[in-house]
Amino acid sequence: MLHDVSLSVGAGGITALLGANGAGKTTLLRAVCNMMVRVEGAIRFEGTRINGRATEEIARLGIAHVPDGRGTFTHLTVEENLRLGAYSRRDRKEVVAADFARVYDYFPRLRERRQQQAGTLSGGEQQMLAIARALMMRPKLLLLDEPSFGLAPVVVQEIFRILTAINKDERTSMLLVEQNASLALQLADHAYLIETGQIVMGGEAAVISGNPSVRRAYLGY
């Protein structure tokens, strides 16, 4: 359960949300998307109140959610998964080769495996597919829930490099839930710390990473 949560994500910025397991990070992302979370107060996107709207409508406004566990359709091919990612777009009938080329440029491995069943991909490739599928929506805001979970360090570095490129190239805003606090704070420009459903700290990522309590609890020094 969340209590009196107040945070913001700047247009074109990356905001990290840090906290222990059970602190409320995933619940917060689900609340933004109206995914079985009751909300009191207001959630606004580009000045418009969105809580209470259907999840599909929120997606059409430009908010894409990359859930924990990746959520790939394992029996569909890579390309079929990507096409489903564009389903909520108003112009989904106009999805063209350029849309696929755009995400394949970020994720060349997926181009090589485009006709392969998603369930046969490695864990890292499935995470790449989950992000690529969200990009097919051409989102203004990406909600990323633990993109590094269960992945080898070299794969995590590659995924975070790609996220940096997406943010730089497309000015896609990101709200990143991540237990790898060191990587998250390197990627983000702002950060919040959530404990037992409440925001207990927030500010510029560089300032948060220099806080002695954060260093001890999340950075290991």
Image: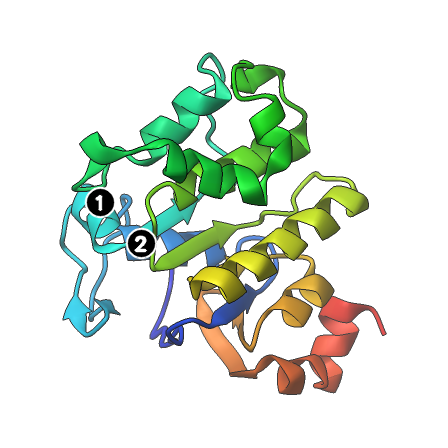
Residue type indicated by callout 1: Thr
Which residue in the protein does label 1 denote? 55
Comparing 97 with 56, the one in front is 97
Relative placement, left or right, of 140 versus 160 is: left
Say which element carries label 2.
strand
Q: Does residue 23 appear in this view?
A: no
Comparing 201 with 152, the one in front is 152
Relative placement, left or right, of 78 versus 93 is: right
Comparing 54 with 137, the one in front is 137
User: Which of the two marks, 2 or 1, is nearer to us in this view?
Assistant: 2
Specify few, some or many for label 1: CA neighbours under 10 Å numbering under 14, 14-19, or 20 or more: some
Query: Residue 206 has which mark?
Result: none
Specify few, some or many for label 2: CA neighbours under 10 Å numbering under 14, 14-19, or 20 or more: many
Say which element carries label 1.
helix
Residue type indicated by callout 2: Ile
- The quadrant the C terminus occupies is bottom right
Which residue in the protein does label 2 denote? 63
Q: Does residue 143 appear in this view?
A: yes
Query: How far apart are the alpha carbons under marks 2 and 1?
Result: 10 Å
- The residue at 57%/49% (across/down) is 146
Comparing 145 with 121, the one in front is 121
Residue 133 point in image, percent of width and height: 43, 37
